[in-house]
Amino acid sequence: MPVNVALLGFGLSGRYLQSPFYAAHPGFSIRHVVTSRAEELAEAYPALRPTADVATAIEDPVVDLVSIATPNATHYEFARAALEAGKHVLVDKPAASTSAQVRELKNLAARQNRHLFVFQNRRWDSDFLTVREILNSNSVGRLVGYEARYDRWKPAPNAKRWKETPGPGAGMLYDLGAHLIDQAIVLFGPPKHVDGHSWTERADSSVPDAFHLWLDYGTHRATLSCSVLVREPTPRYRLLGEGGSFTKFGIDQQEDHLKAGLRPGDSEFGIEARNYRGLLHTDDGRVAVPTLPGDWMALFDNVHQTIEGKQLPAVSLDEVVLQLEIIEACSYAGAAI
């Protein structure tokens, strides 16, 4: 029997980052989509009609999994309601506005004997998978520096009003920093020490839109940063080691592919253009490294396999708690985690 899904929200995340994978995976069936975007839903899925409200979707006894793709400030409330209704939950990042809320949701999921999954899809980005392979192969020798950036040229405030509304979970550190911090935790585990801060660069922005973090791992430091006022592309990742360096420009193409009409399983889906291959520079010379295919479907397959009792969650809630603790500490220089 398929896992029946109630999808909350049909904006960028719901329409492009979540629903195509549920539709392509044979183990899922979308039963509800809670959205006011009736025309967009009909265009993408002619057989579906929007569900009027969150409560109707959550309380439907046929629903097994509630997938939350709504604004950040609603994540905790909707995840808690779905867990209390006895549903499994996949919630977009940030899972909540505070680490305390994630701990509460983790405990609630355990009491309800349900799974709480967090949508850290960028663990399966093409460029990040390639960076992991470079590190695992020891291609740059002993690592001394790791840099990951999320730079963009977006001088105007976001057209999505909720992204520009001050409040819990608002700003680039929660939006994009959640991905960069999660990736650093995947690669290196808990840092020994954290420094960092977030600030507002654009004159018309009402939320913090830039950040710079330093995660100290003893043998090396991870530097994570973001700005929306960077017009000239900067490296997405840099690995600095005693044996050489690896530099990667560009960004995973799965989101752009989905917006262009490609779907998971298409032959070109998740494949990056050759001109964005990373550069490995060692004593043996400079070599262009092919980028591994992006694979966000792996997250959805893990969700399905975990619900079926065949796997453990790929994204542990302890890692998500640590992520929020780092975000909470970033405004205090020298904060220990």
Image (spheres, rainbow, N blue to C red):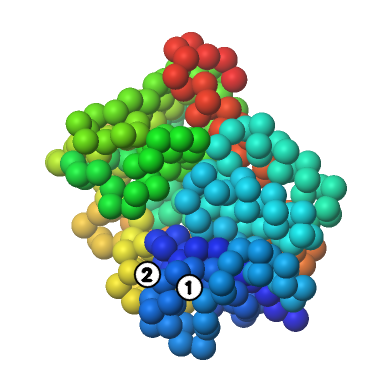
Q: Which of the pair 286/330 is nearer the observer? A: 330
- Give SS at disc 2: helix
- Give SS at disc 1: helix
Residue 236 can be seen in this image: yes
217 lies left or right of 27:
left
Residue at 18 percent across and 41 percent down: it is 155
Q: Which of the pair 64/267 is nearer the observer? A: 64
Which residue is labeled 2 in the image?
A: 258
324 lies left or right of 55:
left
Vertical relation: 225 (above or below) 79: above
Query: Given the image, on which type of amino acid does mark 2 rest?
Result: Leu
User: Residue 60's spot in the image, x, y percent?
Assistant: 72, 72
Task: Using a 10 Å C-alpha cutoff, classify the residue at mark 1 as few (fewer than 14 neighbours), some (14 to 19) or many (20 or more).
Answer: some
User: Residue 55's spot in the image, x, y percent?
Assistant: 66, 64
Vertical relation: 279 (above or below) 268: above
**Label located before the other in sequence (1 or 2):** 1
38 lies left or right of 311:
left
Q: CA distance from mark 1 to mark 2?
A: 8 Å
| Dots 1, 2 in contact, CB < 8 A | yes
Kindly give the residue lying farthest to the top in the view shown.
334
Query: On the image, which quarter does residue 254 sit in?
Result: bottom left
Q: Quadrant of the C terminus?
A: top right
Q: Quadrant of the N terminus?
A: bottom right
Query: Given the image, on which type of amino acid does mark 1 rest?
Result: Pro
